[in-house]
Image: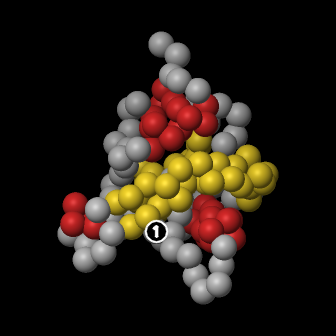
Amino acid sequence: MRGDSILLVKRARPPSQGLYAFPGGKVEGDETLEDAARRELVEETGLRATGLRPLREIHIDGRDDSHPVDYLLTVFGAAYAGGEAVASDDAETAAFYTLKEMTLLPLVGSVFAVAEELLGPLQT
């Protein structure tokens, strides 16, 4: 998070190609979930964060995206600690969006609900 905005990337590849999602990826070797979240954030966006904390686990049925396996995603919340958002080869864009701006984006599944948990409900 940075102020009243949340970092999202527009996925350049499947799954969820063309949709906006939280940056992330797979846990490698003996990494903890927090270490993987921190590494993926830097790799996918060039940004650093502090205060990483798990917010929610989301089960993704792989059959929905024609994958042979299911996924268990752990969404982390964190505070922006520096760097400039730059998309990696896995993403078309990386930028911060307010809840109002997110209503205009094609989002992956539960992204908006998790963003509201972090920022509070959208004020109309």
Between 113 and 11, the residue placed more toward the observer is 113
Residue in the foreground of this view, choosing between 6 and 60? 60
Q: How is the image coloured?
A: secondary structure
Furthest residue to the bottom? 29
Residue position marked by numbered label 1 in the rendering: 90
Q: Residue furthest top?
A: 124
The mark tally for this picture is 1
Q: Quadrant of the N terminus?
A: top right
Q: Residue, x 49% and y 55% (percent of image)?
A: 57
Residue depicted at x 39% and y 67%: 71
Q: Residues within 10 Å of mark 1 (few under 14, many from 20)?
A: some
Residue 36 quadrant: bottom right
Secondary structure under the numbered disc 1 in the rendered image: loop
**Residue 107 lies in quadrant:** top left
Does 99 sit left or right of 38 as displayed?
A: left
Residue 12: quarter of image: bottom left
Return the x and y of residue 116 as percentages of the image width and height.
Answer: 53, 32
Q: Amino acid at mark 1?
A: Asp
6 in relation to 81, above or below: above
State whether residue 14 appears in this view: no
Residue 26 vs residue 43, the one in the foreground:
26
Residue 12 located left or right of residue 66: right
At which x and y percent is residue 39?
A: 66, 71
**Visible in this render: residue 70?**
yes
Q: Position of residue 112 (x, y in %)?
A: 45, 38
Q: Is residue 121 left or right of residue 34?
A: left
Q: Is residue 58 above or below residue 89?
A: above
Residue 91 lies, in percent from the top left, at 46, 62
Q: Residue at x 65, y 31 (%)?
A: 4
